[in-house]
Amino acid sequence: MDLAVVEKTLQEEMSSLRAPGAAMVVLEGGRAVLVKGYGVRSAEDPVAVNEKTLFRLGSTAKVFTALAALRLATDGRLDLHAPIGGHAVFGKVTMHQLLSHQAGLRDDAPQNGPHDESALGRHVETYGEDFVLAPPGKLFSYSNPGYVLAGHVIERITGKPFAAAVHELVLAPYGMTASTYRPFEAMMHPLALPHDPAGKLIRPFPDHAGAWPPGSLFSNAEDMARFLSRALPEDLRKAKAASTGSGQQYSYGVLLEEGRLFHTGARAGYGSRFEIYPEQGVAVFLAGNRTGALFSRTAAALRGQVTAATARKVIAAIGMEEGEARQLAGMYVNRGALRAELVFGEGALRLKAGARTIAIQKLGDNLYRAPGGAQLEQFRIVRDEAGNPAYLCAEVWCLKKQ
C-alpha cells in the first residue's frame, strides 16, 4: 500500500474542506502501519494534532453502543428480541429493532442541550407519537433517537450512567483508555476543537448529554487502532437489516457493502469514518475537527489500493405511466429538513430541489432516479397494503407520505 499517496490525498482534502486537523489509522493484518495526526487542534491556537489527540466521532460511535448491548446480551442481562418496556410510546420495540434501525422512529440529532448525564432519561421521555414513522419491523430507516433509546436501556440494566456503562462494557476491555463521552474528561487530554464548514471555531462547545449514545464518543488514533486491531464479534455482523433506499445491509452500528464494513459520522464540529476489509485484512480510521469532515476522497484512495475497482452498473430508465406519476406526487417527510416534495406537471413527475426541479426517471418496480438530486439520486417507494405510495426511501432514510 502506497501510504504516501493516501497521506497526500488527505492533506489536500483537509485544505478543500477547511478542516484544521485530522487523524488517520491504517492497519494491515491486524498490525498498525500508520497511526498519525495532521494539522492543528484549533485554527486560533495552532497546536499540532498527534496520535493522542481526541476527536468527537459522530455516528461512527454507534458501534460502541451496539457492542455494549451485545455484551449485556452475552452475559444474559438483555434479550435483544424482547420489548424494551419502560416507555409510553416505544416500550414494545426490541433492542434488535433499535440497533438495526427497524423500530419505526423518525430521525433527529440535537447538537446542543443539557450537560448533566441524567439528561438521557429526560430526553427519551420527550419521544411521543410525533416520533413514530412506521410500525416496528415494517422498514429500515436510520434513526438517531433509536440509539438514544438503546443507550437508556443500557443505563436501566446496568444501573449506571451511559458513559460509565459503555466504558466498563466496551472501552476498557478494548484498551481504549483515553476514549470518553464526557467533554470534561476529554478536555483533560489533547483535544481537537470543533470547527464549522468555514473553518471557524464553534462557540460554545456543542454538546447534549441526552443524545450521547448515537454519536458523541471522543476517541483518538491510538485508541481506534486498538479497537480496529480486533475482529468485530460475529453476532454484531450477523444481525443484518436491508436498507430499502441504498440496498446496503445494516448490522448493529455497521454498514456492510461489497466486502467492506464501514460507518461514517458527522456532527457539529467533527466528522469521522472507519472502513474494514475482512478479506484483505485492512482497516482504516479517519477523523477531522470540521463539521461533516468524512474524508470521502481519502477513503476512496485507500479503497482503490485495497480492492479491485468495479464499475457501478448503470440502470437504464424505462417509461412511467401518467397515472403512476400522479400517484407518487406529494410531500414525503421524516423530520425537520429531512423531506422531499414530488410534483406532477406538464406530463412529468419532478423533484423540487430549492428553486429548481429535477425530472424523475423510473428504473424498475418502485425504483426511481432523480439525476443530480443528491441524497435522492436513487430512491425506492414502499407501498401500503392497498398499493398506494406510503414511504420514499433514499440512502438510509425513509420519508413518510403526508
Image (cartoon, rainbow, N blue to C red):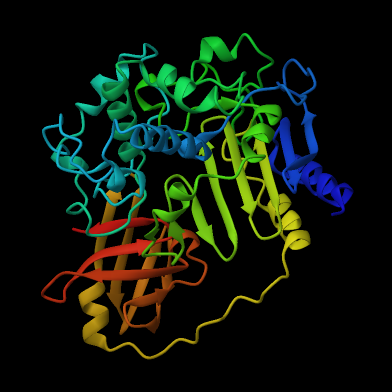
Between 57 and 174, the one nearer to me in the picture: 174
At x 27%, y 80%, the residue is: 325
Residue 335 in view in this figure? no
* Residue 101 at x, y percent in the picture: 33, 49
Residue drawn at x 45%, y 44% is 253
Name which quarter of the figure residue 291 lies in.
top right
Q: Identify which residue, 238 or 185, lies in the foreground.
A: 238
- The reply to whether residue 387 is visible in this rendering is yes
* Quadrant of the rendering where the C terminus is positioned: bottom left
Question: Residue 47, how many percent across, how many down?
Answer: 78, 17
Q: Quadrant of residue 310?
A: bottom right
Image location of residue 187, percent across then percent down: 60, 11
Q: Residue at x 74, y 44 (%)?
A: 27
| Residue 54, placed above or below residue 33 | above
Q: How many marks?
A: 0
- Judge from the rendering whether residue 332 lies leftward or rightward of residue 116; answer left or right: left
* Percent coordinates x, y for residue 152 in the rendering: 29, 27
* Residue 306 higher or lower than 154, as above or below: below
Image-based side of 348 in relation to 89, left or right = right
Quick one: quadrant of the N terminus?
bottom right
